[in-house]
Amino acid sequence: MPSSFNQVLNNMKNQDILCVKNYDAGASITEAYTDFEHLEKETQVVSRSYNTSGNKKDYTRGNASLEASIEASVIGNSHIDWQSRDLLPDLRGRRAIYSRAGDSMTGVFNIEKFIQLWSNSSLRRSAGPEWLPCL
């Protein structure tokens, strides 16, 4: 093999990236590990959508949700990010962001995180809680 091939292989950076989006809940979660020497992780993601209507213009999506349970042991870099946004665009075509958070870490560390994002149930206009749960 040419020496340039070995140089390229030795300079490759490790990365493990997972991005999950639930459009019915207006939620997304990103889990990314880069430049790591050691990575042991167990991630479980549950995405639910409960739209009982067949009408695509019906934005009363019910109780859609996105949940992630993350456990990891890392030597390297990690970035965990999530956001929850409105399903309906405003007059300019933009969607309001209800919440957004991110954790970026470098070094030797363990992560245990549970993220639970639900749709804005006040869109249903029915009996039940009219709030977006916060963690």
Image: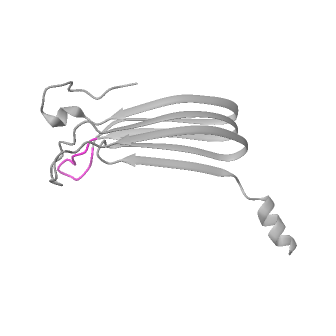
Rendered image quadrant of residue 106: top right
Residue 101: give x, y in percent of width and height. Answer: 45, 34
Which residue is painted at 12% across and 33% down in the image? Answer: 125
Residue 106 located left or right of residue 90: right
Residue 84 located left or right of residue 19: left
Asked if residue 92 is among those painted magenta in the image, a careful observer would answer: yes
Q: Quadrant of the N terminus?
A: bottom right
Residue 91: give x, y in percent of width and height. Answer: 17, 50
Q: How is the image coloured?
A: one colour
Q: Is residue 101 above or below residue 21?
A: above
Residue 109: give x, y in percent of width and height. Answer: 68, 30
Number of callouts = 0
Residue 89: give x, y in percent of width and height. Answer: 22, 48
Q: Quadrant of the C terminus?
A: top left
Which is more toward the observer, 20 or 49? Answer: 49
Which residue is painted at 86% across and 75% down in the image? Answer: 2
Which residue is painted at 55% across and 39% down in the image? Answer: 43
Q: Is residue 69 above or below residue 33?
A: above
Mostly what secondary structure, the magenta segment?
A: loop
Asked if residue 133 is among those painted magenta in the image, a careful observer would answer: no
Rendered image quadrant of residue 47: top left
Q: Which residues are magenta?
A: 86-95
Which residue is painted at 61% across and 49% down in the image? Answer: 16
